[in-house]
Amino acid sequence: MNKKMLFTIITTSLLIVGCGKNDTTNSLQQNEKPSLEASTENNVTTESQEESISITTTTAAATAAGNTIDYKQYLKKTWIRNTDSDFPDNGGLSILISKIGEGKIQGEVSAVGNGPAYNIDSAEFEGTVNNDTAECQLVNDSRGNKGKIELLFKSDNTLEATITITGRSNDTVMSLPEGKFEFTPYNLKNIKGLELIKEQTFMVDLNSWGNVKFVSGKLTGGDHIPVVFYLTNEDGDILYNFYAALPYSIDVKAVSFQDVNKDGRKDIIIIVADNYDGATGDPIATVFLQEADGSFTNDYKLDQEINDSGNSKDISTIANYILSKF
């Protein structure tokens, strides 16, 4: 499985797999700890909703109730353990299901320890789905452990997971916990200090994502005020977390959704401006290009080229500049 995405709720700096990493302060807000992408740029690649076929299988209980399981509702969400308070700042356990279809399932489970080290252990999982249960093997564990995970799809928007470690490596710094845990979707309401920027928050049709909400916001709980961007469903469950190398204390001036690299998929152009004392107020552009699997790539060098060349003044100028390169 392509490990491209998501432990999409902690910052990119916290999601480096391996030994613990001390939290640092940097002028770029990408080192802030707002939430997890699931995500970081090293997240599990999400499968498009069109490609991930919903398996509708009837359990005995569901048959009695006249209901069926729509597995698609479990995709493209970061599920967090319901006993983890102030996640991810206090660490926690999360699950991302990246693909489910034709009786098979793939995803990733990640555990993050408390600060300041924020040690992490993550493993991909793959297996089979039978009615309301998925039985999977853990593979590519970042600490070299072996094990299995069983998932139970429950009807009350919860996911139950039983994790068993069958073989331990010599790395004792961090490990996935063993036991039975309940998970709920990571939601905007779980993000401490999040202040929505309503005028830059929109419902948008983003190809394989379908009709989703693009959310702009600021994290106001700390000394630094970073901007954050998410894709969510109508209930506020976080489907994707964007990580932008932008300064602190900025205002979001414009957001546009259009294909700027001629691949038929909508990309995202964002314009921000500094608002702190002494700032020039010059517009700063950042661009996210949508990949075939629905993930988004930010090319920092492209952003820098746009801004340094003076082509960041408005959406049309930015789009034309990028289009000229493809």
Image: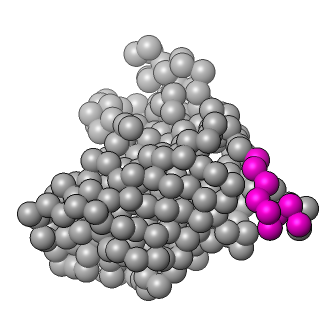
In the image, residue 287 sits, relative to residue 182, either above or below, namely above
In the image, residue 150 sits, relative to residue 192, either above or below, namely above
Residue at point 91%, 62% (across, down): 66
Residue at point 46%, 76% (across, down): 180
The answer to whether residue 48 is visible is yes
Locate the N terminus and report the quarter of the image it occupies: top left
The image quadrant that residue 147 belongs to is bottom left
Residue nearest the viewer, comparing 151 with 45: 151
In percent of width and height, residue 124 lies at: 37, 50
Q: Give the colouring mode of the picture.
A: one colour
Residue 320 lies in magenta, yes or no?
no
Left or right position of 108 against 14 = right
Locate the C terminus and report the quarter of the image it occupies: top left
Q: How many marks are shown on the rendered structure? A: 0
The answer to whether residue 220 is visible is no
Left or right position of 227 against 253 = left
In percent of width and height, residue 206 lies at: 64, 38
Residue nearest the viewer, comparing 222 with 48: 48
Left or right position of 219 against 101 = left
Residue at point 43%, 61% (across, down): 149
Left or right position of 284 against 290 = left
In percent of width and height, residue 4 lies at: 36, 42
In percent of width and height, residue 17 lies at: 22, 56
Which region shows up in magenta? 56-64
Residue at point 50%, 68% (across, down): 161
The image quadrant that residue 219 belongs to is bottom left
Residue nearest the viewer, comparing 202 with 76: 76
In the image, residue 308 sits, relative to residue 143, either above or below, namely above
